[in-house]
Image: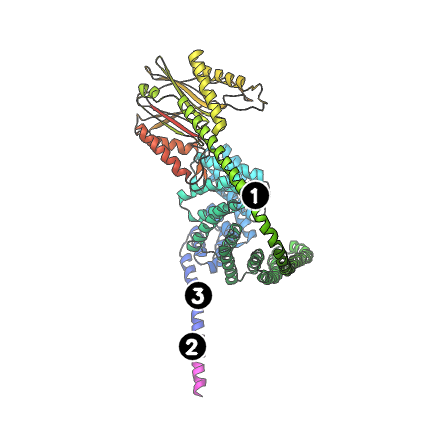
Amino acid sequence: MRSVSIFRVIFICAIIFFVTEESKAQINIDSLLGVVNQHDNDSLRIRKLLIYSREYPDSCLFFVNKASQIANSKSYHPAVVELLALAQHFSQLGNNVQSIKYFRESIDLAQQNKDFKHLIQARNEFGYSYTLHGKSDSAIILHLQNLQFADKQSEYAKTYPSTCLYLAFAYRQYGDLKKAQYYFKTSEQKARLFSDSTILHIAIHERGNIYAMMNNTDSALFYQLEAYEIRKRLKNKYYLLVSFNDIAGSYYRIGNNALAAAYFEKSLELTKNEFYDPNLLFALYGNLGSVYHSLGNFSKAESYYTESLEIAKTNNVKYQLRDAHYHLAYFYFGTKKFELSAEFALSAYAYNDSVYTEENSKTIEELSTKYETEKKEQQIVIQKLEIRKKNLQTTYLLISSSIFLVLLLLTIFAYRQKNKAHRLIKFQNMEIMEKNEELRQQKEEIEAQRDEISYQNQIVTDQNKHITDSINYASKIQKAALPKHAVFETYVSDFFILFKPRDIVSGDFYWAEKIGNQLIVAVADCTGHGVPGAFMSMLGISFLGNIIRKQDIKQTNMVLEELRHEIKTTLSQTTHASDQKDGMDIAFFTINTDTLELHFSGAFNPLYIIRSSGTEPELIELKADRQPVAVYINEKPFAFQVFQLQKGDVVYSFSDGYVDQFGGSGGGKYKTKKFKAFLETISNLPMPEQKKLLDTEFETWRGKLPQTDDVLVVGLKV
């Protein structure tokens, strides 16, 4: 009897507890609605309800529906902002009928009130919603309307970057990758024009993704790395995570598995610490397993594949379990653990059937939900689905059976090969005993051959030394042909020459001469490097001396014209279609040491002048003609430029070896923009110190990568 009484007390307490909790929940919602009803203004009521929809996700639909009822009341004249917010909320909830209704109402109201700012926003948001739900053709129309409006109304031109971005997403979903790439590029250009960094990095990154979809991985990686640099400055961890994953994928596709692993590792660390997502973790562990498998690091590959399987078990997602088992089956087959491979292959096959069943059940369930609002249309869809279901079932069964059969046959084949190998070993042991005698007889012959090889190696070593000595001697001749530093020391206040041949001899050269009050300087980059480049450089030095000293030609453009004539004649370059295209890029200039007037002509190589008369150094660029000193398809006369120097100006001339060097954290080129900025920072320092800093900057950027070209930088301070 006593135990029964205790049971009754517990039962009553439980009822009281659940009733109290239910009352608390009701009181909570009622109290929130009470706060809403305190506002006389319907606009404030809607905004409060939408705030509650975000703060209480479990009751999100309840609060959004309440806001919708107020917006639909006849006494209320809604604002565009509230209608747009309602449309976005219903779109996020998957209620397309309601979201489309409010998107259209927000557009109509904005047009009536001539609220063009919110009209553009409403069209873009509506279009993006269409894109997300597979109606990209409707999205394109809305975004194009915004572009036409921005063209007519210049005060809304700043909406161009975001509208082009939305339009590019729509064209990509539509399948027109060329137009998607065009509008991503336009979005990038407009974002740069308006300094809109929030759009710029997205547009650049998506340009890379389009190239990835076109299988142009090199271009994809270029834009992904550029966007990554911007995102590092913005310190947006979410977009950094996106960059890590896409960059890793690009490196993996081009076969650079080491860098792919490094970026996947960065993504893994950020996902664990900042954006924990079990589904993303599953994908990352699988990707890292594949990368380390390709690198031959089997211990790490097995570890990450195993982690992927553990995450799949925790998530209890059938397709993840299937994929994780397939990865391990493939891995163990590759490492010749055939029993484990077969075990995981059978498990993957079993999970594949479960995935198929779940996918079909999920599809039918989704269609049944939509059936209430789109009854007639869904009847046709469900009939088609049943036919598709049967076809898919047959296809899935055929694929699954084929995969299982292939794995089974491979396992059987491996087992038979193993037995065959055992039999071969026994047979080979007998053969080995028979061949021991032969080997013993061959020993003396091998020793004789070894002596001959040693002799030949010595000959090769001697020849190599002879060739190297010859090239070293050629280097001395080339250096002797270069002008002495005294030419500069006498006529400029300070100077430096940074000369770093890639090989022993160089295709880059500098040349200087002082005639009267004119200091004449050339900095050239010949076709090729090493021995071929050195031959061209010696020709260039000889031709320049002959043109200026013997022919007495000093006007910079006429010197380049005559130099081109000499090269074409000497190398028999008769037409632009000639096989012989050797020549040089050059910056050629003269400085009047009395008046400081500079004359300049250039072939591809420009001239930089940095003036420090103000608070900040000013870089002035004298551009070169876009043609070489050689035969060329669009050959034209070289331009003649005049510039008045001031005392203290620094003149820089250089070849392209510095800016084209690969290095840095991403393995990209140094680039002209970075080079200009670095020159501006060091331009006030003594010239020997500038040379040292330029050399240090180059070597630091290069790191462990090889030098890609000859490097030549000449700086003169007047």
Any magenta on residue 10?
Answer: yes
Judged left or right of residue 127, residue 502 is left
Q: Quadrant of the N terminus?
A: bottom left
Q: Amino acid at mark 2?
A: Cys
Q: How many numbered circles does the render carry?
A: 3
Image coords of residue 433 (percent x, y): 61, 57
| Element assignment for label 2 | helix
Q: Identify which amino acid the numbered label 1 is placed on.
A: Met
Q: Secondary structure at mark 1?
A: helix
- Distance from the alpha carbon under mark 3 to that under mark 2: 18 Å
In this view, the residue in front, 609 or 521, is: 521
Q: Closest to the observer: 99 or 219?
A: 219
Among the two numbered marks 1 and 2 on one chain, the one whose residue lies closer to the N terminus: 2
Q: Position of residue 121 (x, y in %)?
A: 48, 42
Residue pointed to by mark 3? 25
Numbered range of the magenta stretch: 1-15
Give me the residue at 30% from left, 27% from top: 614
Disc number lying in front (3 or 2): 2
How is the rendered protein coloured?
A: rainbow
**Residue count near mark 2 (Cα–Cα under 10 Å), binned few <14, some 14–19, many ≥20:** few
Q: Is residue 200 left or right of residue 494?
A: right
Residue identified by numbered label 1: 213
Q: Main secondary structure of the magenta part?
A: helix
Visible in this render: residue 692?
yes
Q: Amino acid at mark 3?
A: Ala
Q: Is residue 520 visible?
A: no
Q: Residue at x 35, y 12 (%)?
A: 516
